[in-house]
Image (cartoon, rainbow, N blue to C red):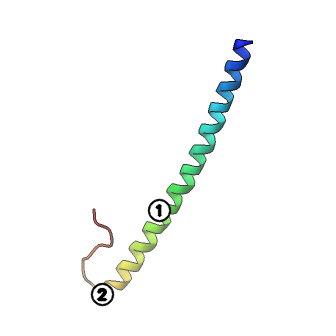
Amino acid sequence: MVPLLLVLLLALILFGAGFAIKILWWVAVAVLVIWLLGFLVRSADSGGSRSRWYRW
C-alpha cells in the first residue's frame, strides 16, 4: 500500500511541476513581448536621444 501511495504522490508532484513550468514559460514570453514593445516604442519616440525606458 505504501509504494502505491508513493507512486501516486510522485505523479501528483510531477503533474503539478509540469503545469507550473508551462505557466512560467507563458509568463516569460509575455514579459519578453512587453519588453520588446516598450523598447521599440521608446526608440521610435526618443527622437535620437540615448534615453532608456528601463532603469537597469
Foreground residue, 18 or 4? Answer: 4
Label of residue 47 in the image: 2
Q: Amino acid at mark 1?
A: Leu
In the rendered view, tell whether residue 47 sits above or below residue 38.
below
In the rendered image, the quadrant that contains the N terminus is: top right
In the rendered view, tell whether residue 49 sits above or below residue 54.
below
Q: Residues within 10 Å of mark 1 (few under 14, many from 20)?
A: few
Secondary element under disc 1, as helix, strand or loop, is helix
Residue annotated with mark 1: 32
Give coordinates of residue 47: x percent, y percent. Answer: 30, 87
Foreground residue, 26 or 50? Answer: 26
Give coordinates of residue 37: x percent, y percent. Answer: 46, 73
Occupied quadrant, residue 16: top right
First in residue order: circle 2 vs circle 1: 1
How far separated are the C-alphas under marks 2 and 1?
24 Å
Farthest-out residue, left: 50
